[in-house]
Image (tube, rainbow, N blue to C red):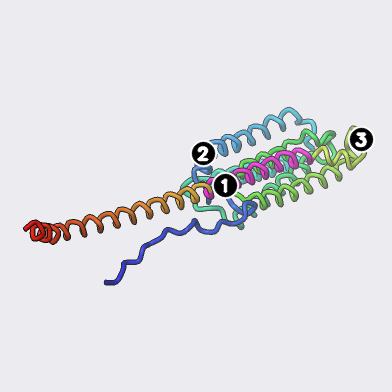
């Protein structure tokens, strides 16, 4: 008789490194839960830009660039909200590149809209919008990608601040003026990177514990099945032997 092979459930598929993992792939519920927050952040960014532009209207030196800035902002917000819909497939690198390209253009256009009239870049709304977008991407992009773009956007904001430093009304040196305009991206972007990396590590740790527990239960189940089979075989052998033993016993009794 040929024994039937036993199917053994193998461990989970190999996961990429936590720095390259995306939460929406390993934990789709996190992306679903983050969707309302993403929409709120997107709407808040538009409101922030409008209020800041109205209260600092005297700093606007180019109305066409201001209009262009808001067109880019709306395009980035719509793109972000559209790409994070639950019915959409996972982001591609090309889509992420489009969004970050819009964010770079946003900062450049916002700087040109106030060129020569911006006296304190530390309170500009464009870098804050970029920083909030990075935080909104924690469930959809990998920590490594977020770290790279945090560095890129911080560098762009610093260069723009440095170029505008001659028009600043501050005794600070130009490099410090540039840092004050870009540090918000660095701080919030770093927080986004740390959060995404921590969540990925937690998911991996949970999966490892769950798999070890499943293996332990499987071993216990296999041992229980083996004992049950042996017991059944012994019982069957006992039942088969009972008639023979009865005959032998009756013969011996005579």
User: In what element is the residue under mark 3?
Assistant: loop
Residue 25 x, y percent position in the rendering: 53, 51
**Real-space Cα separation, disc 1 to disc 3, in angstroms:** 47 Å
Answer whether labels 1 and 2 touch (C-beta < 8 Å). no
Question: At 31% from the left edge and 67% from the top edge, which residue is drawn?
Answer: 4
Residue hosting label 3: 172
Which quadrant would the N terminus be assigned to in this image? Answer: bottom left
- Front position among marks 3 and 2: 2
Instruction: State which tag comes first along the sequence, 3 or 2.
Output: 2
- Residue 227 circle label: none
Question: Dot 1 surroundings within 10 Å: few (below 14), some, or many (20 or more)?
Answer: few
Residue hosting label 2: 33
Question: At 17% from the left edge and 56% from the top edge, which residue is drawn?
Answer: 239
Determine whether 7 is above or below 39 in the image.
below
Q: Is residue 42 left or right of residue 152?
A: left
Answer whether labels 3 and 2 touch (C-beta < 8 Å). no
Question: Dot 3 surroundings within 10 Å: few (below 14), some, or many (20 or more)?
Answer: few
Instruction: State which tag comes first along the sequence, 1 or 2.
Output: 2
Residue 168 x, y percent position in the rendering: 88, 36
Residue 60 x, y percent position in the rendering: 77, 36
Q: Residue furthest left?
A: 254
Question: At 83% from the left edge and 47% from the top edge, which residue is drawn?
Answer: 159
Q: Is residue 15 left or right of residue 45?
A: left
Residue 8 belongs to the span the image colors magenta: no
Q: Which residues are magenta?
A: 182-208
- Residue 205 circle label: 1
Residue 191 belongs to the span the image colors magenta: yes
**Real-space Cα separation, disc 1 to disc 2, in angstroms:** 21 Å
- Overall secondary structure of the magenta section: helix
**Real-space Cα separation, disc 3 to disc 2, in angstroms:** 43 Å
């Amino acid at each position: 008789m040929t024994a039937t092979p036993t199917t053994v459930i193998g461990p989970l598929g190999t996961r990429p490194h936590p720095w390259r993992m995306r939460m929406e792939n390993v934990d789709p519920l996190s992306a679903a839960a983050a969707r309302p927050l993403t929409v709120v952040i997107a709407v808040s960014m538009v409101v922030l830009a409008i209020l800041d532009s109205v209260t600092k209207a005297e700093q606007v030196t180019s109305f066409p660039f201001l209009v262009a800035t808001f067109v880019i902002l709306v395009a980035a917000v719509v793109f972000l909200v559209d790409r994070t819909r639950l019915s959409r497939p996972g982001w591609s690198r090309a889509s992420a590149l489009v969004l970050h390209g819009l964010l770079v253009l946003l900062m450049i256009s916002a700087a040109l809209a106030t060129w020569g009239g911006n006296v304190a870049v530390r309170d500009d709304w464009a870098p804050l919008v970029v920083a909030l977008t990075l935080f909104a991407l924690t469930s959809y992009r990998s920590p490594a990608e977020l770290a790279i773009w945090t560095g890129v956007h911080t560098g762009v904001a610093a260069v723009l601040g440095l170029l505008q430093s001659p028009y600043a009304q501050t005794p600070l040196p130009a490099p410090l003026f540039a840092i004050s305009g870009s540090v918000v991206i660095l701080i919030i972007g770093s927080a986004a990177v740390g959060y995404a990396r921590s969540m990925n590590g937690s998911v991996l740790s949970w999966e490892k514990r769950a798999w070890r527990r499943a293996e332990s239960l499987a071993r216990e189940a296999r041992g229980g099945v083996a004992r049950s089979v042996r017991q059944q075989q012994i019982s069957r052998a006992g039942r088969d032997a009972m008639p023979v033993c009865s005959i032998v016993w009756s013969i011996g009794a005579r």
